[in-house]
Image: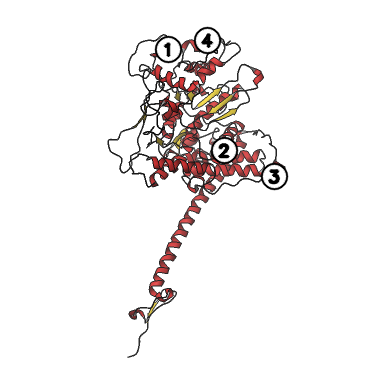
Amino acid sequence: GVGDSAGPGLENKGPVAASSLVPDAVINPHPRFGTLTRNIRSRRGATVDIRAPRFLDANTPPDAGDIAADAMAFGMGCCCLQVTFQCRDVEESRHVYDQLAVLAPVMMALTAACPIVSGKLQDHDVRWGLVAQSVDDRTPAERGETSGEVDPDMARGGVSPLRTSRYSAASSYICSHKQCGHHCAAAHYNDVDLEIDELAHKQLVDAGIDDLLARHIAHLFVRDPLVLFEGLVEELDDAVATDHFENLQSTNWNSVRWKPPPADASEHVGWRVELRTMEVQLTDFENAAFTVFCVLVLRVLLSFDLNIYVPMSKVHENMARAHRRDAVTRQKFWWRSHMVRPDRGACPSHQKGQPCSVHDDAGAVVEMTCLEILTGKGAYYPGLVPLVLVYLDSIGCDPDTAQRVKTYVDLIVKRASGELKTAAAWTRDFVASHPAYACDSVVPPETAYDLLQRCHDVGVGAAHEPSLLGPEPKVAPVRKENAYNVPLARVHFQTSDSLRTLLDQYAERANLVRRRSELAGDVARLKADLVRAEAELKDVDDALEPRSQGLSRPASMQRMRASSDGTLSVEILSP
């Protein structure tokens, strides 16, 4: 999208995207993508309008304004890391959907990798907002800009307001099967207005679908389908095929997607949930680390029967915070204080007959950094990482796999602490240190070329970036004892007390790990101070005893001697 970056002979303002920045030639030749691009623009009534806050560097003009782009390519051209989870049944899939909706913003901040758009540094670190704007097909009336005229061919006439683009955060929780114990009804946390197609909602409820799920599905139907394939319209029988539903579902791009199985049971595809917020990383090692971590966190939540619900409005606020530059270390995210109902009897305040804000509210939501979410906060929240470690211990994980997982976890925790950089931070630093960059927020072609070459080298293992990856990852040895996959056991705790005891133990372990890291940092700083002091001492010794460097002593210093304890003596000569 900069100059003639698409090559000679390729002109902008093509009939599909109508973009002033990129030619239609950059669109994937599959009919779906050109059709999506054209129909989004057609329904909207104009080209898409993408805006990103510009990063203000030392030489950035004060009136530079936001970065502007005008084509779907600037959003859907971004890469991402999506993970689909197979669930046991429909009930579990609905619970998994809700938990992943809460986790999604945090994982986006941890994997931030998109600081450049349209050849300029943006003041955000992720792609999500760019993609949302690049596929925003809402009419002016739906965006709240005009009253508009009803178009009977559009969903709800094309005039009913819609809060967001069809690419957005999850809009509501859908789990209804955990209504007792420390699990609160998901409906309690649905505090965001949800636009629904009333006719679709009534049809679902009349068919016996509970209101939570009916509203989720009816929300999909406030959008129009964007792509239809010839031979797959009237020819399909909705009683035996789900293509029409999937056509609409697949163009509602949310942070989490609930995926029912196809109608054809012979395909052996069950209930699935897709986590969609993570940004793709440069290496397979990083992508594997984040994928495995998400899988293990989910298994922890299911096996230990934990609960991380927060109000949906807080999830949306977390999504906004996750966009910001260096959000992984600078931002705090709303997170649940207690994943199990707190034991008031163990609280020192309650033992004294005093109220306690931590233990009195089982559903308390507080602000935490990414590091606190991962490693724990105070004595009441154990952290996700200690829970993953206790889960691995509980299922009898083989040593090689356990060591590999700990390597993955190490990487993620160091990203959260700032010890290692996110891909976004690494990219910014690369651009800032490049000789062609003029500190004006504009990425020159030479810088872009060298950046991509370096990304390629790191990705294929030809180069190593310690600030991004830490010590070189080692490949675990292959042993015949662990050559086959071992089914993971499902952990069950007899009482909530036993679970709380285990969480307490790992919370204490997390505190010790944090303290160890602090002490290691102190030792490193003291060693650096010692090296500097020894170098200065050597300089002083050389000044006092220059003959140690092959130099003669000045006459005025011939009678001076310095002992090892720092005492200076002067020899008095007789006349």
Give percent across and percent down for residue 340: 55, 33
Give the residue at x 40% y 36%. 116
Q: Earlier in the sequence, mark 1 or mark 3?
A: 1
Q: Earlier in the sequence, mark 4 or mark 1?
A: 1
Label 1 vs label 3: CA separation? Answer: 60 Å
Circle on res. 203: 4
Disc 2 residue type?
A: Ala
Circle on res. 479: 3
Label 3 vs label 2: CA separation? Answer: 20 Å
Label 3 vs label 4: CA separation? Answer: 56 Å
Q: Are marks 2 and 4 in contact (CB under 8 Å)?
A: no
Q: Earlier in the sequence, mark 2 or mark 1?
A: 1
Q: Indicate the colouring scheme.
A: secondary structure
Circle on res. 288: 2
Q: How many neighbours does mark 2 have within 10 angstroms: few (below 14), some (14-19), or many (20 or more)?
A: some
Left/right of residue 51 with respect to residue 221 in the rendered view: left
- Circle 4 — which element? helix
- Looking at the image, residue 29 lies above or below residue 297: above
Q: Earlier in the sequence, mark 2 or mark 4?
A: 4
| Residue under label 1 | 154
Q: Earlier in the sequence, mark 3 or mark 4?
A: 4
User: In front of the other: label 3 or label 4?
Assistant: 3
